[in-house]
Amino acid sequence: MNSCKYFRLRHKQGRSYYYCTLKSRIIGNECSSCSFIEYRTRNTLKKTTYKHSKADKERYSIIYHDLTKCAFDNSKTSIEKNEVFEGSYRQTSIRLGMVIPLCKTHHDLFHNDRYFALSVKNEFQKAYIKNHSYDEFIKEFKIDYHYLFEEYKKMLKQQKKTRD
């Protein structure tokens, strides 16, 4: 496709057509012959701000006090501080201390193995509920990971029974 910033693909009554927003009219499939062509500028990704880098350095965990070694095998090589609840809950995880130190092997396992990830999330949910309430956890994260973990274990048992 064309990368002119005025070039658009529009639809009307089930038909597609190309439109130039500068000239305000329908055009052919290209605007390369246009004398007003302007290419889109690509924005570069921002570097982390001071605020974000400071928050990353000050991360803590409510379960693991030594964030320099892996939580599972105590190795100290290539440790990554991983937020337990990722995605839109990343900042909430950092703020509430839901951070786990993982080596490369366990980090990959956390992101690729649903059972492992749910067990870690369940563990952090239990630790959070010790000092706060269940309702506060649900208010922050919107999901009961203990329930999900138990349901996933049941599903795995059923699959194992059907295979045998």
Image (cartoon, helix red, strand yellow):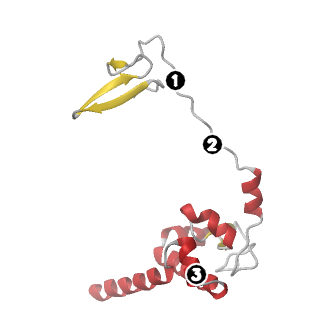
Element on which disc 3 rests: helix
Question: In this view of the protein, can residue 90 be seen by the observer?
Answer: yes
Disc 2 packing (10 Å; few <14; some 14–19; many ≥20): few
Disc 1 packing (10 Å; few <14; some 14–19; many ≥20): few
Nearest to N terminus: mark 1 or mark 2: 1
Residue drawn at point x = 59 percent, y = 71 percent: 84
Residue drawn at point x = 66 percent, y = 43 percent: 46
What separation in Å lies between label 3 and label 2 (alpha carbons)?
34 Å
Does residue 153 appear to the left or right of 55 in the view shown?
A: left
Q: Which of 78/22 is in front?
A: 22
Does residue 15 appear to the left or right of 25 in the view shown?
A: left
Does residue 66 appear to the left or right of 101 in the view shown?
A: right
Nearest to N terminus: mark 3 or mark 2: 2
Label 1 with label 2: CB-CB less than 8 Å: no
Question: In this view of the protein, can residue 120 be seen by the observer?
Answer: no
Report the number of discs.
3
Place of residue 10 in the rendered image (x, y in percent of width and height, measured from the top left):
33, 31
Image quadrant in which the N terminus is located: top left
Residue where numbered disc 1 is placed = 39
The image quadrant that residue 106 belongs to is: bottom right
Place of residue 108 in the rendered image (x, y in percent of width and height, measured from the top left):
55, 67
Place of residue 80 in the rendered image (x, y in percent of width and height, measured from the top left):
67, 66
Residue drawn at point x = 29 percent, y = 26 percent: 17
- Give the residue type at disc 2: Leu
Residue where numbered disc 2 is placed = 45
